[in-house]
Image (spheres, helix red, strand yellow):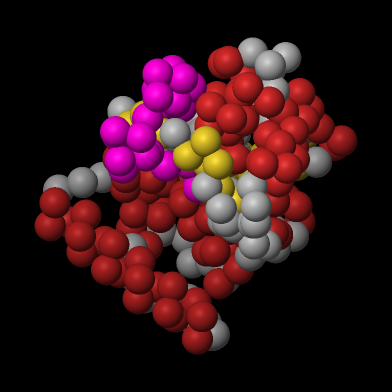
């Protein structure tokens, strides 16, 4: 199989498609660096290195073919294209190192870059109810503490907010303690704990916590 000589921009398009290992639209390619113009797309398509299709809003989506993967694998051992600028030459130095590593470990290119990506789901946003409970806990703390940063019993907070369900209170105060300057800690002197204090504790990990504080902003 021949190994087409490409321009630096065309080579960069193939390497970005390789690295992303999924089809990319022309605008997305541009965001990642290389611009795939019509002549470049036609050349890559004619050589069988990419496939292109029309997607949403008539945008073109591009992906590597098997031949495109093979081209990238061979190019790892090649030098940069003629007239390459320093950033492209630096890229090829990195690619050559990847090629050496693949050879040493007897890996194929697709075994590294072609693996399916894990889907990472964003954490759901806090509900307005949880945010409201957190605000009420802070307001109650401020009414009970003699100054910002003073420790207040969790039991006192609970008893001042009797309408809030225990699990909802726990969830809200645990969310608050992730904020800078907010503390939810155990009472070190266990002899000072009443049965009410023990029952009101919020468990963080495996540690029952009985005291809450908010430092100065």
Whether residue 207 is situated above or below residue 27 in the rendered picture: above
Which residue lies at the image location 17% right of the left edge and 56% below the top edge?
103
Q: Position of residue 136 (x, y in %)?
A: 74, 33
The magenta segment: 182-203
Q: Position of residue 59 (x, y in %)?
A: 80, 41
Quarter of the figure with residue 80:
bottom left
Residue sitting nearer the eye, 13 or 46: 13
Specify whether residue 156 is painted magenta.
no
Quadrant for residue 94, please give it: bottom left
Q: Position of residue 63 (x, y in %)?
A: 57, 41
Vertical comparison of 17 with 193: above or below:
below
Horizontal relation, residue 17 to residue 72: left or right = right
Q: Nearer the viewer, residue 170 or 189?
A: 189
- Residue at image x 85%, y 37%? 58
Q: Identify which residue is drawn at 14% across, 48% down.
A: 106
| Residue at 54% in and 85% down | 85
């Amino acid at each position: 199989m021949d190994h087409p000589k490409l321009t630096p921009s065309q080579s960069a398009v193939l390497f970005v498609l390789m690295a992303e290992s999924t089809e990319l639209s022309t605008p997305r390619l541009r965001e990642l660096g290389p611009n795939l113009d019509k002549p470049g797309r036609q050349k890559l398509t004619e050589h069988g290195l990419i496939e292109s299709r029309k997607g949403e809003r008539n945008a073109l989506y591009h992906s590597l073919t098997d031949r495109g993967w093979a081209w990238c694998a061979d190019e790892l051992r090649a030098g940069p294209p003629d007239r390459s600028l320093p950033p492209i030459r630096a890229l090829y130095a990195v690619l050559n190192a990847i090629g050496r590593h693949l050879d040493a470990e007897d890996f194929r290119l697709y075994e590294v870059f072609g693996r399916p990506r894990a889907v990472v789901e964003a954490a759901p946003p806090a509900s307005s109810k949880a945010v409201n409970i957190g605000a009420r806990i802070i307001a109650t703390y401020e009414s009970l503490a003699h100054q910002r940063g003073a420790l207040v019993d969790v039991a006192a907070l609970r008893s001042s907010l009797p309408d809030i369900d225990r699990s909802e209170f726990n969830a809200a105060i645990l969310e608050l303690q992730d904020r800078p300057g907010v503390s939810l800690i155990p009472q070190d002197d266990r002899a000072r704990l009443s049965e009410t204090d023990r029952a009101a504790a919020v468990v963080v990990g495996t540690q029952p916590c009985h005291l809450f504080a908010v430092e100065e902003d």
